[in-house]
Amino acid sequence: MRTALAERLGFDVPIFAFSHCRDVVVEVTKAGGFGVLGAATFGPEQLEVELKWIDEHVGGRPYGVDVIIPSKYDTKAEAETGKTDLHDLIPAEHKAFMEKLLAEAGIPELPEDERKHVYKEIMEGRGAMTPDGARRLVDTALRHEQVRLIVSALGAPPPDIVEQIRAKNVMIGALCGKPEHAVRQKAAGVELIVAQGTEAGGHTGEISTLVLVPQVIDAVENDIPVLAAGGISRGSQVAAALAMGAAGVWCGTIWLGTQESELNAFEKEAMFRARTEDAVRRRARTGKTVRMLKSRLSEAWEEPGAPPYLLPPLQGILYNEAHARAVKAERADYYSFPAGQCVGNMTSETTVKQVMYEMQEELLQSLERMGSILDA
Protein backbone atom coordinates (compact mmCIF):
# COMPACT_ATOMS: atom_id res chain seq x y z
CA MET A 1 0.00 0.00 0.00
CA ARG A 2 1.55 3.26 -1.10
CA THR A 3 0.51 6.26 0.96
CA ALA A 4 2.23 9.50 1.92
CA LEU A 5 2.97 8.00 5.35
CA ALA A 6 4.41 4.84 3.80
CA GLU A 7 6.61 6.92 1.51
CA ARG A 8 7.97 8.97 4.40
CA LEU A 9 8.57 6.09 6.82
CA GLY A 10 9.47 3.39 4.33
CA PHE A 11 7.09 0.55 5.23
CA ASP A 12 5.14 -1.72 2.88
CA VAL A 13 2.30 -2.80 5.16
CA PRO A 14 0.48 -0.34 7.48
CA ILE A 15 1.09 -2.44 10.60
CA PHE A 16 3.05 -0.67 13.33
CA ALA A 17 4.39 -3.00 16.02
CA PHE A 18 5.06 -1.59 19.48
CA SER A 19 7.33 -3.86 21.51
CA HIS A 20 9.94 -3.68 24.25
CA CYS A 21 11.73 -6.52 22.47
CA ARG A 22 14.27 -5.68 19.78
CA ASP A 23 13.74 -9.04 18.07
CA VAL A 24 10.07 -8.23 17.48
CA VAL A 25 10.94 -4.79 16.13
CA VAL A 26 13.40 -6.30 13.66
CA GLU A 27 11.17 -9.15 12.48
CA VAL A 28 8.11 -6.94 11.94
CA THR A 29 10.16 -4.39 10.04
CA LYS A 30 11.80 -7.04 7.86
CA ALA A 31 8.32 -8.40 7.10
CA GLY A 32 7.28 -5.02 5.66
CA GLY A 33 5.70 -3.45 8.72
CA PHE A 34 7.14 -0.74 10.97
CA GLY A 35 8.64 -1.75 14.29
CA VAL A 36 8.69 0.68 17.22
CA LEU A 37 10.87 -0.09 20.24
CA GLY A 38 9.34 0.82 23.60
CA ALA A 39 12.15 2.56 25.46
CA ALA A 40 10.45 3.09 28.84
CA THR A 41 12.21 0.14 30.46
CA PHE A 42 15.70 1.22 29.35
CA GLY A 43 18.19 3.74 30.56
CA PRO A 44 20.15 5.65 27.88
CA GLU A 45 23.11 3.27 27.94
CA GLN A 46 20.98 0.17 27.46
CA LEU A 47 18.87 1.90 24.81
CA GLU A 48 22.06 2.59 22.88
CA VAL A 49 22.89 -1.14 22.99
CA GLU A 50 19.38 -2.07 21.79
CA LEU A 51 19.34 0.43 18.92
CA LYS A 52 22.81 -0.52 17.75
CA TRP A 53 21.69 -4.16 17.59
CA ILE A 54 18.55 -3.24 15.64
CA ASP A 55 20.62 -1.15 13.21
CA GLU A 56 22.79 -4.19 12.53
CA HIS A 57 19.91 -6.65 12.02
CA VAL A 58 17.10 -4.74 10.33
CA GLY A 59 18.60 -4.77 6.84
CA GLY A 60 18.86 -1.02 6.47
CA ARG A 61 15.14 -0.46 6.95
CA PRO A 62 13.81 2.40 9.14
CA TYR A 63 12.11 1.90 12.50
CA GLY A 64 10.84 3.93 15.45
CA VAL A 65 11.27 4.51 19.19
CA ASP A 66 8.56 5.14 21.79
CA VAL A 67 9.32 7.15 24.95
CA ILE A 68 7.23 8.06 28.00
CA ILE A 69 7.16 11.74 28.92
CA PRO A 70 4.74 11.95 31.87
CA SER A 71 2.93 15.23 32.49
CA LYS A 72 2.58 14.36 36.20
CA TYR A 73 5.56 12.91 38.02
CA ASP A 74 7.50 13.12 41.26
CA THR A 75 9.67 16.22 40.82
CA LYS A 76 11.92 15.26 43.74
CA ALA A 77 12.55 11.89 42.13
CA GLU A 78 13.48 13.59 38.88
CA ALA A 79 15.89 15.92 40.65
CA GLU A 80 17.53 12.98 42.44
CA THR A 81 17.72 10.63 39.44
CA GLY A 82 21.32 9.50 39.06
CA LYS A 83 22.30 11.08 42.38
CA THR A 84 20.68 8.76 44.90
CA ASP A 85 18.83 5.47 45.17
CA LEU A 86 15.26 6.34 44.14
CA HIS A 87 14.00 3.42 46.22
CA ASP A 88 14.87 5.54 49.26
CA LEU A 89 12.22 8.07 48.17
CA ILE A 90 9.42 5.50 48.37
CA PRO A 91 7.46 5.97 51.63
CA ALA A 92 7.90 3.26 54.26
CA GLU A 93 4.13 2.67 54.25
CA HIS A 94 4.21 1.63 50.60
CA LYS A 95 7.22 -0.64 51.03
CA ALA A 96 5.64 -2.33 54.04
CA PHE A 97 2.34 -2.86 52.19
CA MET A 98 4.04 -4.55 49.25
CA GLU A 99 6.34 -6.66 51.41
CA LYS A 100 3.46 -7.87 53.60
CA LEU A 101 1.46 -8.80 50.50
CA LEU A 102 4.27 -10.90 49.04
CA ALA A 103 5.29 -12.46 52.36
CA GLU A 104 1.74 -13.60 53.12
CA ALA A 105 1.59 -15.15 49.66
CA GLY A 106 4.81 -17.05 50.31
CA ILE A 107 6.63 -15.35 47.44
CA PRO A 108 10.33 -15.34 48.39
CA GLU A 109 12.80 -12.57 47.88
CA LEU A 110 15.11 -12.84 44.89
CA PRO A 111 18.59 -14.34 45.30
CA GLU A 112 21.04 -11.52 46.00
CA ASP A 113 22.74 -11.56 42.58
CA GLU A 114 19.38 -11.58 40.76
CA ARG A 115 18.00 -8.91 43.05
CA LYS A 116 20.91 -6.59 42.23
CA HIS A 117 20.55 -7.22 38.50
CA VAL A 118 16.78 -6.70 38.48
CA TYR A 119 17.09 -3.70 40.74
CA LYS A 120 19.63 -2.08 38.44
CA GLU A 121 17.35 -2.60 35.44
CA ILE A 122 14.34 -1.21 37.29
CA MET A 123 16.18 1.85 38.54
CA GLU A 124 17.65 2.67 35.13
CA GLY A 125 14.39 2.11 33.29
CA ARG A 126 11.92 3.67 35.70
CA GLY A 127 14.34 6.47 36.43
CA ALA A 128 13.90 7.44 32.79
CA MET A 129 10.16 7.97 33.31
CA THR A 130 10.56 11.69 33.99
CA PRO A 131 10.82 14.56 31.50
CA ASP A 132 14.58 14.75 31.97
CA GLY A 133 14.91 10.98 31.61
CA ALA A 134 12.85 11.04 28.43
CA ARG A 135 15.07 13.75 26.98
CA ARG A 136 18.11 11.53 27.49
CA LEU A 137 16.35 8.70 25.64
CA VAL A 138 15.42 11.04 22.77
CA ASP A 139 19.04 12.20 22.54
CA THR A 140 20.12 8.56 22.26
CA ALA A 141 17.53 7.69 19.63
CA LEU A 142 18.42 10.66 17.43
CA ARG A 143 22.00 9.42 17.13
CA HIS A 144 20.70 6.53 14.98
CA GLU A 145 19.94 7.43 11.38
CA GLN A 146 17.56 4.51 10.86
CA VAL A 147 15.26 5.86 13.59
CA ARG A 148 12.71 7.75 11.50
CA LEU A 149 9.90 8.08 14.07
CA ILE A 150 9.84 9.00 17.76
CA VAL A 151 6.53 8.62 19.58
CA SER A 152 5.49 10.19 22.87
CA ALA A 153 3.48 7.60 24.79
CA LEU A 154 1.76 10.00 27.21
CA GLY A 155 0.55 13.02 25.29
CA ALA A 156 2.05 16.01 23.53
CA PRO A 157 5.82 16.31 24.03
CA PRO A 158 7.34 19.60 25.28
CA PRO A 159 8.23 22.24 22.65
CA ASP A 160 11.99 21.74 22.99
CA ILE A 161 11.69 18.01 22.25
CA VAL A 162 9.40 18.67 19.27
CA GLU A 163 11.91 21.15 17.88
CA GLN A 164 14.84 18.80 18.49
CA ILE A 165 13.18 15.86 16.74
CA ARG A 166 11.88 17.81 13.76
CA ALA A 167 15.26 19.46 13.28
CA LYS A 168 16.61 15.99 12.52
CA ASN A 169 13.80 15.42 9.98
CA VAL A 170 12.52 12.60 12.18
CA MET A 171 8.76 12.23 12.32
CA ILE A 172 7.17 12.84 15.71
CA GLY A 173 4.10 10.97 16.87
CA ALA A 174 1.99 10.81 20.02
CA LEU A 175 -0.62 8.53 21.53
CA CYS A 176 -4.00 9.92 22.53
CA GLY A 177 -7.16 8.61 24.17
CA LYS A 178 -9.47 11.57 23.56
CA PRO A 179 -10.14 13.87 20.57
CA GLU A 180 -9.14 16.93 22.58
CA HIS A 181 -5.76 15.31 23.23
CA ALA A 182 -5.23 15.01 19.48
CA VAL A 183 -6.06 18.70 18.97
CA ARG A 184 -3.41 19.69 21.51
CA GLN A 185 -0.89 17.31 19.98
CA LYS A 186 -1.46 18.70 16.49
CA ALA A 187 -1.01 22.25 17.83
CA ALA A 188 2.23 21.14 19.50
CA GLY A 189 3.68 20.02 16.16
CA VAL A 190 2.97 16.28 16.32
CA GLU A 191 2.90 14.78 12.81
CA LEU A 192 1.35 11.36 13.51
CA ILE A 193 -1.43 10.53 15.97
CA VAL A 194 -1.98 7.08 17.46
CA ALA A 195 -5.64 6.97 18.51
CA GLN A 196 -5.50 4.37 21.27
CA GLY A 197 -8.81 2.94 22.39
CA THR A 198 -9.47 1.54 25.83
CA GLU A 199 -9.02 -2.03 24.55
CA ALA A 200 -5.26 -1.44 24.35
CA GLY A 201 -2.69 -2.73 26.79
CA GLY A 202 -0.57 -0.32 28.79
CA HIS A 203 -1.50 3.30 29.51
CA THR A 204 -4.96 3.76 28.03
CA GLY A 205 -8.17 5.76 28.43
CA GLU A 206 -11.87 4.93 28.44
CA ILE A 207 -13.11 5.41 24.84
CA SER A 208 -13.32 2.37 22.55
CA THR A 209 -11.21 2.19 19.41
CA LEU A 210 -14.20 2.04 17.06
CA VAL A 211 -15.57 5.27 18.51
CA LEU A 212 -12.26 7.06 19.08
CA VAL A 213 -10.57 6.70 15.68
CA PRO A 214 -13.12 8.64 13.56
CA GLN A 215 -13.42 11.24 16.32
CA VAL A 216 -9.67 11.83 16.28
CA ILE A 217 -9.56 11.98 12.47
CA ASP A 218 -12.25 14.66 12.57
CA ALA A 219 -10.52 16.49 15.42
CA VAL A 220 -7.29 16.91 13.44
CA GLU A 221 -9.35 17.72 10.32
CA ASN A 222 -7.66 14.87 8.48
CA ASP A 223 -4.54 17.06 8.19
CA ILE A 224 -2.19 14.51 9.74
CA PRO A 225 -2.23 10.70 9.57
CA VAL A 226 -3.93 8.74 12.35
CA LEU A 227 -3.19 5.16 13.37
CA ALA A 228 -5.83 3.00 15.04
CA ALA A 229 -4.76 1.22 18.24
CA GLY A 230 -6.47 -0.89 20.86
CA GLY A 231 -7.40 -4.55 20.65
CA ILE A 232 -6.11 -5.00 17.11
CA SER A 233 -4.67 -8.42 16.27
CA ARG A 234 -6.40 -9.45 13.03
CA GLY A 235 -6.32 -8.40 9.40
CA SER A 236 -10.07 -7.75 9.35
CA GLN A 237 -9.49 -5.14 12.06
CA VAL A 238 -6.79 -3.52 9.91
CA ALA A 239 -9.33 -3.33 7.08
CA ALA A 240 -11.87 -1.79 9.45
CA ALA A 241 -9.33 0.81 10.57
CA LEU A 242 -8.54 1.72 6.96
CA ALA A 243 -12.27 1.94 6.22
CA MET A 244 -12.62 4.47 9.07
CA GLY A 245 -9.90 6.62 7.49
CA ALA A 246 -6.91 5.53 9.55
CA ALA A 247 -3.52 5.36 7.84
CA GLY A 248 -2.71 2.06 9.53
CA VAL A 249 -2.78 0.26 12.87
CA TRP A 250 -0.64 0.16 15.99
CA CYS A 251 -0.41 -3.25 17.72
CA GLY A 252 1.30 -4.30 20.94
CA THR A 253 -0.23 -7.22 22.83
CA ILE A 254 -0.28 -9.66 19.90
CA TRP A 255 3.54 -9.81 19.81
CA LEU A 256 3.77 -11.00 23.44
CA GLY A 257 2.81 -14.53 22.43
CA THR A 258 5.49 -14.90 19.76
CA GLN A 259 8.76 -16.82 19.97
CA GLU A 260 10.61 -13.52 19.66
CA SER A 261 8.81 -11.92 22.63
CA GLU A 262 10.68 -10.79 25.73
CA LEU A 263 8.40 -12.93 27.90
CA ASN A 264 9.58 -16.30 29.21
CA ALA A 265 7.60 -19.55 28.94
CA PHE A 266 5.82 -19.03 32.28
CA GLU A 267 4.74 -15.51 31.32
CA LYS A 268 3.52 -16.55 27.89
CA GLU A 269 1.47 -19.35 29.41
CA ALA A 270 -0.18 -16.79 31.69
CA MET A 271 -1.10 -14.81 28.59
CA PHE A 272 -2.50 -17.86 26.80
CA ARG A 273 -4.71 -18.73 29.79
CA ALA A 274 -6.07 -15.20 30.10
CA ARG A 275 -9.52 -14.26 28.86
CA THR A 276 -10.46 -10.94 27.32
CA GLU A 277 -12.11 -9.82 30.56
CA ASP A 278 -8.92 -10.54 32.49
CA ALA A 279 -7.29 -7.47 30.92
CA VAL A 280 -8.29 -4.72 33.36
CA ARG A 281 -7.35 -1.07 33.90
CA ARG A 282 -5.42 -0.52 37.12
CA ARG A 283 -2.94 2.05 38.49
CA ALA A 284 -0.77 -0.35 40.48
CA ARG A 285 1.97 -0.65 37.88
CA THR A 286 2.97 2.98 37.26
CA GLY A 287 0.56 5.21 39.19
CA LYS A 288 -1.36 5.90 35.97
CA THR A 289 -4.10 3.69 34.51
CA VAL A 290 -2.59 0.70 32.73
CA ARG A 291 -4.56 -2.14 31.14
CA MET A 292 -2.92 -5.27 32.51
CA LEU A 293 -3.68 -8.83 33.49
CA LYS A 294 -5.81 -9.03 36.61
CA SER A 295 -4.14 -10.75 39.54
CA ARG A 296 -3.94 -10.66 43.31
CA LEU A 297 -1.08 -8.20 42.96
CA SER A 298 -3.08 -5.74 40.87
CA GLU A 299 -6.24 -6.11 42.95
CA ALA A 300 -4.55 -5.66 46.34
CA TRP A 301 -4.01 -2.00 45.50
CA GLU A 302 -7.76 -1.59 44.89
CA GLU A 303 -8.72 -2.79 48.34
CA PRO A 304 -9.69 -0.48 51.23
CA GLY A 305 -6.65 0.30 53.33
CA ALA A 306 -4.19 0.17 50.44
CA PRO A 307 -1.81 3.16 50.36
CA PRO A 308 -2.36 5.87 47.75
CA TYR A 309 -0.65 5.45 44.40
CA LEU A 310 2.70 7.16 43.96
CA LEU A 311 3.54 9.38 41.02
CA PRO A 312 5.92 8.18 38.29
CA PRO A 313 8.57 6.91 38.52
CA LEU A 314 8.23 5.74 42.15
CA GLN A 315 5.12 3.56 41.80
CA GLY A 316 6.79 1.75 38.90
CA ILE A 317 9.96 1.14 40.88
CA LEU A 318 7.99 -0.31 43.78
CA TYR A 319 5.73 -2.45 41.59
CA ASN A 320 8.33 -3.85 39.24
CA GLU A 321 10.47 -5.29 42.01
CA ALA A 322 7.42 -7.18 43.28
CA HIS A 323 6.56 -8.26 39.75
CA ALA A 324 10.07 -9.70 39.29
CA ARG A 325 9.60 -11.78 42.44
CA ALA A 326 6.24 -13.13 41.20
CA VAL A 327 7.83 -14.12 37.88
CA LYS A 328 10.79 -15.81 39.59
CA ALA A 329 8.40 -17.79 41.80
CA GLU A 330 6.17 -18.53 38.78
CA ARG A 331 3.10 -17.37 40.65
CA ALA A 332 0.47 -16.86 37.97
CA ASP A 333 -2.02 -15.65 40.58
CA TYR A 334 0.26 -12.66 41.26
CA TYR A 335 1.33 -12.06 37.65
CA SER A 336 0.16 -8.76 36.14
CA PHE A 337 1.80 -7.68 32.88
CA PRO A 338 0.39 -5.01 30.54
CA ALA A 339 -1.94 -6.62 28.00
CA GLY A 340 -4.84 -5.47 25.85
CA GLN A 341 -8.21 -7.13 25.42
CA CYS A 342 -7.02 -9.06 22.37
CA VAL A 343 -5.14 -11.29 24.84
CA GLY A 344 -8.24 -13.48 24.72
CA ASN A 345 -7.37 -14.35 21.10
CA MET A 346 -3.91 -15.63 22.03
CA THR A 347 -3.90 -19.34 22.86
CA SER A 348 -0.49 -20.68 21.80
CA GLU A 349 2.98 -19.53 20.78
CA THR A 350 3.41 -18.18 17.27
CA THR A 351 6.15 -16.27 15.44
CA VAL A 352 6.24 -12.66 14.32
CA LYS A 353 6.45 -13.85 10.71
CA GLN A 354 3.35 -16.01 11.15
CA VAL A 355 1.36 -13.16 12.75
CA MET A 356 2.36 -10.75 9.99
CA TYR A 357 1.45 -13.27 7.29
CA GLU A 358 -1.94 -14.09 8.80
CA MET A 359 -2.82 -10.43 9.35
CA GLN A 360 -1.90 -9.51 5.78
CA GLU A 361 -3.77 -12.50 4.34
CA GLU A 362 -6.92 -11.64 6.28
CA LEU A 363 -6.55 -7.97 5.37
CA LEU A 364 -6.55 -8.84 1.66
CA GLN A 365 -9.51 -11.17 2.09
CA SER A 366 -11.42 -8.44 3.91
CA LEU A 367 -10.67 -5.86 1.23
CA GLU A 368 -11.73 -8.29 -1.51
CA ARG A 369 -14.95 -9.02 0.38
CA MET A 370 -15.74 -5.32 0.66
CA GLY A 371 -14.92 -4.90 -3.03
CA SER A 372 -17.33 -7.66 -4.01
CA ILE A 373 -20.09 -5.98 -2.00
CA LEU A 374 -19.53 -2.76 -3.92
CA ASP A 375 -19.47 -4.60 -7.25
CA ALA A 376 -22.79 -6.21 -6.41
Image: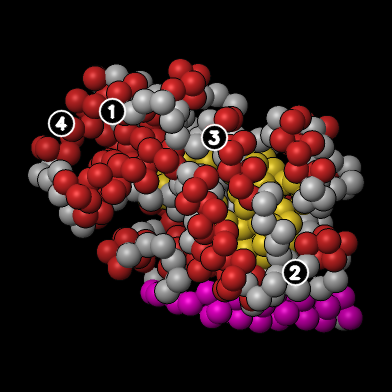
Q: Which numbered disc flags the more N-terminal residue, 3 or 4?
A: 4
Give the residue type that dot 4 points to.
Answer: Lys
Residues at marks 4 and 1 touching, judged by CB atoms closer than 8 Å: no
To which residue does mark 3 refer? Answer: 133
Query: Where residue 303 is drawn, which disc sits there?
Result: 1
For label 4, the crowd category at 10 Å Cα-Cα, with few meaning under 14, some 14 to 19 and many 20 or more, is few
> Which circle, 3 or 2, is nearer the viewer?
3
Q: Where does the image place residue 203, in percent across and percent down from the top left? A: 53, 41
Residue 373: quadrant of the picture: bottom right
Q: Amino acid at mark 1?
A: Glu
- Nearest to the eye among marks 3 and 1: give it: 3
Quadrant for the N terminus in the image: bottom right
Answer few, some or many: residues within 10 Å of disc 3's Cα (few below 14, many 20 plus, some between 14 and 19). Answer: many
Q: Nearer the viewer, residue 63 or 352?
A: 63
x then y, percent, for residue 234: 60, 69
- Mark 3, secondary structure of its residue: helix
Q: CA distance from mark 4 to mark 1?
A: 14 Å
Q: Earlier in the sequence, mark 2 or mark 1?
A: 2
Q: Position of residue 340 (x, y in %)?
A: 49, 53
Q: Mark 3 or mark 2: name the one nearer the start of the chain.
A: 2
Which residue is at the front of the view, 201 or 319? 319
Give the extent of the magenta segment: 348-375
Q: Earlier in the sequence, mark 2 or mark 4?
A: 2
